[in-house]
Amino acid sequence: MTTHSLLDLLFFDPKKEGRPESPRAQIYVKTYSCDEKERVCVGPICVSLSEIEAQCNRLTKEIESIRKKARRKFKTK
């Protein structure tokens, strides 16, 4: 099964542009869908507890991956 990352890290390093500010980061939503009330959804419709638990686990892994990426980025600054 192919999974696509829904979240990612935006990392800004002002020093690359010669500015003295500190680096900063932000998590953003790369892809999403909306329901009929225009609420942003970051996963498929789940019809069982095991499906929603699997989605929660997938999102947790994604967040952990972003955390690792951020640690690497901030460490090199």
Image (cartoon, rainbow, N blue to C red):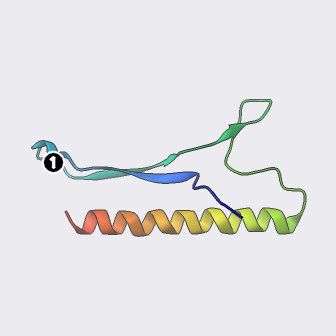
Residue that mark 1 sits on: 16
State left or right for residue 31 relative to residue 36.
Answer: left
Residue sitting at x 70%, y 64%: 56
Residue 28, given in percent of the width and then of the height, sits at: 49, 46
State left or right for residue 30 relative to residue 74.
Answer: right
Residue 5, given in percent of the width and then of the height, sits at: 57, 55
Residue sitting at x 20%, y 52%: 22
Vertical placement of residue 10 versus 2, above or below: above
Which quadrant of the figure has residue 31?
Answer: top right
Q: Residue furthest top?
A: 37
Residue sitting at x 72%, y 62%: 55
Residue 26, given in percent of the width and then of the height, sits at: 41, 49
Q: Which element carries disc 1, helix, strand or loop?
A: helix
Which quadrant of the figure has residue 2?
Answer: bottom right
Pointer 1 local density, CA inside 10 Å: few below 14, some 14–19, many at least 20: few
Residue 40, given in percent of the width and then of the height, sits at: 67, 39
Residue sitting at x 90%, y 57%: 47
Amino acid on which the number 1 mark rests in the picture:
Lys
State left or right for residue 54 relative to residue 42.
Answer: right
Q: Residue furthest front?
A: 1
